[in-house]
Amino acid sequence: MQPLRLVFDTNIYVMASGMPGGYIVYWLDMALPPDNRFQLYTSSAILIEVQAKLEQKMRFERAQAVEFINRLKRIAIEVNPTQILNIVKEDPDDNVILECALEAHADIIVSADRDLLRLKQFEGIQIHHPSNLKYIFSYIAGDK
């Protein structure tokens, strides 16, 4: 069985940055060797947005934000989307998440964004709120 391919929305990374030791950080660690329980994908557009949000909303110093981004680069596989989408008109930044997921052939997008969650799925890619994933991650972790 191939590992699940996931894309985390910017808001998930921002949540992880504000909750060291929380469940999202645990999920990030699950993507690292030796566990490699799933494959996490990102893009430069997502990483740029994460860094901006960390500095603006979370008041991270630039060095702190860069350190967090570098950690994400060690965890996630960076793809370069070839398609530009205009699916979420209310919040065009959400389209970079869809573009990344499409390029990565993702199985699941994890997001707390209402506009993305309203879609439920996109091109066969499921879109889930992080609270819905405890069962999936429990299965992946072997915590049946």
Image: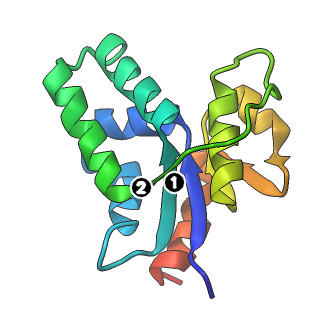
Task: Residue 71 in the image: state x and y as whole percent.
Answer: 26, 48
The residue tagged 2 is: 76
Name the residue located 41 percent from the left edge and 59 percent from the top edge: 27
Q: What residue type is disc 1 on? A: Tyr
Name the residue located 51 percent from the left edge and 31 percent from the top edge: 45
Q: What residue type is disc 2 on? A: Ala
Q: CA distance from mark 1 to mark 2?
A: 5 Å
Question: Does residue 82 appear anywhere in the picture?
Answer: yes
- The reply, left or right, for residue 115 in relation to residue 52 is right
Q: Residue 131 or 122: which is nearer the viewer?
A: 122
The residue tagged 1 is: 41
Q: Are marks 1 and 2 in contact (CB under 8 Å)?
A: yes
Task: Residue 14 in the image: state x and y as whole percent.
Answer: 40, 32
Name the residue located 63 percent from the left edge and 38 percent from the top edge: 97
- The reply, left or right, for residue 130 in relation to residue 92 is left
Task: Residue 109 in the image: state x and y as whole percent.
Answer: 65, 49
Residue 144 falls in image quadrant: bottom right
Characterize the local packing of mark 1: few (<14), some (14-19) or many (20 or more) Cα atoms within 10 angstroms.
Answer: many
Name the residue located 84 percent from the left edge and 57 percent from the top edge: 124
